[in-house]
Image: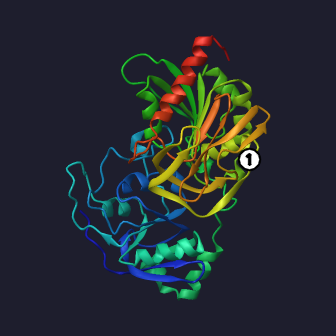
Amino acid sequence: MSGFDSSPAVLVLEDGRVFRGTTFGAVGQTLGEAVFSTGMTGYQETLTDPSYHRQIVVSTAPQIGNTGWNDEDDESVGPTGESAGAKIWVAGYVVRDPSRVTSSWRATGSLQAKLEEQSIVGIAGIDTRALVRHLRTRGSMKAGIFSGEAIAADDDELVRRVQDQPTMLGADLAGEVSTTSGYIVEPKGGEALYTVAAIDLGIKTNTPRMFAERGIRVHVLPSNASLEQILDLKADGVFLSNGPGDPATADGAVHLTKEVIGQGLPLFGICFGNQILGRALGLSTYKMKFGHRGINIPVIEHQTGRIAITAQNHGFALEGEAGQEFDTPFGRAVVSHTCANDGAVEGVRLLDDSAFSVQYHPEAAAGPHDAAYLFDRFTSLLSARKETGVKN
């Protein structure tokens, strides 16, 4: 594998805080929003998740890279659905202690080599505990990583570069990570029982796979797909994916969601899709102080009292309170889930169960799997609709 470069690198935050370490991955300059993830495993899935587009991810786990990189765990595909087009979406990567040895039989290379190959600028050897405490106190903020020739400028100049970049608030990013032409994921083990149109706002690879395991053919459509495209597919239901950016900018997806609900098509959304459904039902969104990112976040489902440990990645959330019922143009709705840690809205649904969504990731690559039952719930809606003989 590629050797480690011990040359200096710096992480600069918009408030002027500077962390000095060594180069990790590619050499150069990168800008983005500094966020932290609490997952101790699954760094490959995190780095390739399109929801992290334009973000510099700080890993709270002290050692990263010991399982290397493999050809199976990427959570992105190319714009036409080809796995060869998978890429790392994070803007930069911050770790404390990168492993110099790859120790997994599944590995086809090292994390260091993959970061270099895809020109992802990172930094190692800094006090990530101090950095995370800073971000938890001050909130996620603009940041930059600089190494090589980029580090030649003085700190004041680097702070200026960081501050001059666009903010995540108001960022319209779904179109930048979406499929361009669409693609199909066929069901496993036989003919398709149902057809689902998945609106790609930054979809993770494992989501269509979870549908395919339940006998569902998935047509992954661009973020700007129209109702006519969905109806032409004779879709039995619609899925709204995860994705990056500010949901307040996604007026097109919100409009499409209203049209889909008006057609009586079952609808299921996750993460960004939860915020889109919430907006379609009349709720507003806000930017969180430091968001939820990791694979150990507890969520309460208020109808059952069930608590699930979930995977999450979001810096925006819906306004609302636990169990809150409210009127919508499509009937009564409820805030169905909230976070046990801070009370943030984690799910909404129409009371007739025709549309529901959650803020977390039930496809859960790389775990946990507490919420996988939600795919079965959606499949039951598709079955019920088909049995009634409802046509588009």
Farthest-out residue, front: 305
Location of residue 41 in the rendering, given as x and y in whole percent from the top left corner:
34, 56
| Residue toward you, 372 or 73 | 372
Give the quadrant of the N terminus. Answer: bottom left
Residue 77 location, quadrant = top left
Examine the rendering and report whether any part of residue 161 can be seen.
yes
Q: Residue at x 42, y 34 (%)?
A: 209
Count of all numbered marks drawn on residues in the image: 1
Examine the rendering and report whether any part of residue 88 can be seen.
no
SS of the residue under disc 1: loop
Give the quadrant of the C terminus. Answer: top right
Judge from the rendering whether residue 21 lies leftward or rightward of residue 329; answer left or right.
Answer: left
| Residue toward you, 121 or 186 | 186
Image position of 295 with respect to 331: above or below: below
Judge from the rendering whether residue 177 lies leftward or rightward of residue 77; answer left or right.
Answer: right
Which residue type does callout 1 highlight? Leu
Location of residue 350 in the rendering, given as x and y in whole percent from the top left corner:
68, 34
Give the residue number, with chain letter if any, for mark 1: 283
Location of residue 171 in the rendering, given as x and y in whole percent from the top left corner:
66, 58
Residue 231 location, quadrant = top right
Judge from the rendering whether residue 364 lies leftward or rightward of residue 355; answer left or right.
Answer: left
Location of residue 270 in the rendering, given as x and y in whole percent from the top left corner:
56, 42
| Residue toward you, 370 or 285 | 370
Q: Label 1: how many residues lie within 10 Å, few (<14), some (14-19) or many (20+)?
A: some
Q: Residue at x 37, y 54 (%)?
A: 44
Q: Residue at x 65, y 66 (%)?
A: 167
Q: Residue at x 62, y 81 (%)?
A: 160
Colouring rule applied to residues: rainbow
